[in-house]
Image: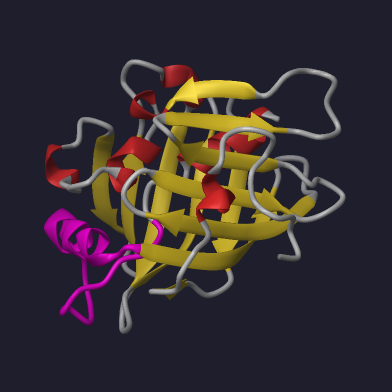
Amino acid sequence: MKHLFRTACAALLVTASSVAADGKLSLSEISGYLNGMKTAESPFTQINDDGSLSTGKLYMHRPGRMRFEYAPPDSATVVAGGGAVVIHDPKSNQPPETYPLKRTPLSIILAKRVDLAKANMVVGHGFDGTATIVTAQDPENPEYGRLDLMFTGDPVELRKWVVYDAGGSQTTVILGGLETGMPLSSTLFSTSGGGGQGFNR
C-alpha cells in the first residue's frame, strides 16, 4: 500500500490558476489559487510502476482534509483529517497505516494559509516549455521520495503528477477534470474505519 501513500503525498497541489496564459507560473500565483479553494473533487487514473492501472476519485476540503478513494478491485482509501493521514486497505490483514499530516507534503496544500515560496518541502520550480513543474520532497523523510507536479496554461490547471520513491519506482497520476465549490460531507474525511460512503456515493 506504500504506492497509495506516495499518491496521497503527491497531492501537494490539486490545481492552479493564474492570469498568465503562457510560461512559467509563479509559486505565489499557485498559492493564491489554493488559498481561494475550499472544496474540490476529481476522478483520477493512476499508472503504477508495473504498468497496471488504478482508478478512483479525489476529494479535498480545505483546510486540513483530503481523500483518495480507489475504485474496486483496489477499494482502498487514503484519508487526511484530524492532523493525520490514514491508509485503509480492506484487502490487507494489517491495521491501517497512520502518518502525521504535518510530516507529509499534504500539509502544504491543506494548510490554512498556503505559501509555497516559504514551504521547505518545495525543492524545485521549473518550466519544460509546455508545463510548469513544481518538485516537492520532505527533507526530514526522504524515503517518501520526490513529487513532480505538472501544470499547463490557458486555462491553467494541473494535468498530472509523477511520484518517484527512494528506490526509483515511478507512479503517475492523471486527473480527469477537477471541479470546485461543491458541498462535501464531513464523513468523507473520517480517519476511522475508512470514512465516506463507498466509491459509488
Is the magenta region chiefly helix, strand or loop? Answer: loop
Image coords of residue 175 (percent x, y)? 55, 65
Residue drawn at the location 57% of the way across and 50% of the way down: 187
Image coords of residue 94 (percent x, y)? 78, 18
Residue drawn at the location 65% of the way across and 28% of the way down: 2
In the displayed structure, 17 sits above or below 186; it is: below
Left or right for 143, reference 70: left
Rendering quarter of residue 28: bottom left
Rendering quarter of residue 137: top left
How many labels were placed on the picture? Answer: 0
Image coords of residue 164 (percent x, y)? 53, 35
In the displayed structure, 119 sits above or below 99; it is: below
Q: Quadrant of the N terminus?
A: top right
Residue drawn at the location 57% of the way across and 30% of the way down: 86
Residue 153 in sight? yes
Rendering quarter of residue 118: top left
Left or right for 111, reference 194: left
Between 113 and 51, the one nearer to me in the picture:
113
Between 15 and 198, the one nearer to me in the picture:
198
Q: Is residue 23 magenta?
A: yes
Residue drawn at the location 26% of the way across and 60% of the way down: 34
Range shown magenta: 14-38
Q: Is residue 79 magenta?
A: no
